[in-house]
Image: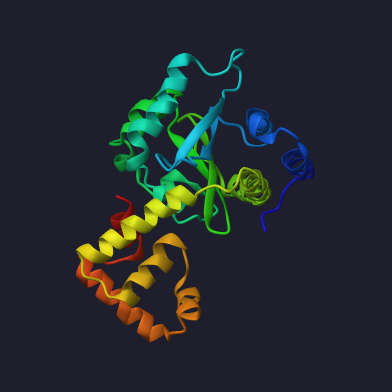
Amino acid sequence: MKKLEQREWAFIDDIVYFIHNDDDFLNERKTLLSYIYQLIPNNFSVFHLADMSGEHLLAHPVVYVQGEENGASHEQIDAINRYIDEYEEEDFGKWIMLVGKRDVYREMDLIDDDEIRTTGYFNDTYAAFDVKYSMQVISAYDKKFLGAIVLGRSTEQGDFSDKELYMMELINRHLSLRLHHEFRKSRGAGSDSGAKLEDRIHGIAEQYSLTKRETEVVFKVVKEGMTNSEICESLCIADHTLNKHLINIYRKCDINSRVALIHKVIS
């Protein structure tokens, strides 16, 4: 456990109380972002909800820019919307959302500096807010993606620390639970996007002539985000049997890792 100061615990307590007790939480997401700013300073932050229509992964963004009296400019809002419309597919963290994994990570932990500079969202969306570094907060419950918060920092501010990631992990546990309750009230989120992912997996299985059991393994890896031990328990197979299935899947799909498998399905 990271050692936190008393003031940091107090901030976290206040944020958690707000998450669980605000009666109009989905419409007060900008207030949440302003509270997070006081705990973890940033250039800008955006809070997306999961897109229930299945057309995109993300929808209904709200943006908080500290020091801007009128909030984000029209140009900055347009840049956020262009990310959803044009750049969502090239986001290297997209697979985390698709498998419904709750996670908090620095983007630079997934992609190196040279590679991220080639992406459209870095040169357009991030540039609109003078952002180089980002922390991604993926909210999910019961393997269903529910929403995402992005915190951005400039070169001068530097990247986010392990301690700051830990504080957001604590907050995200409660945030994921509240979003789960909100989406359940509106008849559940993610069913359309889940069906879309299932279609992609079936398409991969047909394209590469996967067996029924190999297809089941792909579902466990990609859609449910299971570890090897969880897959073995779920399918009642031994570890060496699972490894044989994975080797066959990788060979047929011309890949060499779980991450490559996930990217092949979602790309």
Up-down relation of residue 245 to residue 202 (above or below) = below
Residue 216 lies in quadrant: bottom left
The one of 180 and 3 positioned closer to us in this rendering:
180
In the rendered view, does 208 fall on the left or right side of 131? left
Up-down relation of residue 33 to residue 202 (above or below) = above
**Position in image of residue 250 (x %, y %):** 26, 69
In the rendered view, does 52 fall on the left or right side of 255? right
Residue 265 lies in quadrant: bottom left
Q: How many marks?
A: 0
**Position in image of residue 73 (x %, y %):** 50, 15
Residue under the image location 47 percent in, 67 percent down? 226
Up-down relation of residue 62 to residue 197 (above or below) = above
**Position in image of residue 179 (x %, y %):** 63, 45
Up-down relation of residue 199 to residue 186 (above or below) = below
Residue under the image location 46 percent in, 36 percent down? 133
The one of 238 and 259 positioned closer to us in this rendering:
238
Can you say which quadrant of the picture contains the N terminus? bottom right
Residue under the image location 79 percent in, 44 percent down? 6
The one of 195 and 106 positioned closer to us in this rendering:
195
**Position in image of residue 138 (x %, y %):** 53, 47
| Residue 219 seen in render | yes
The one of 7 and 216 positioned closer to us in this rendering:
216
Snapshot colouring = rainbow
Residue under the image location 45 percent in, 29 percent down? 131
Residue 11 lies in quadrant: top right
| Residue 37 seen in render | no
Farthest top residue? Answer: 70
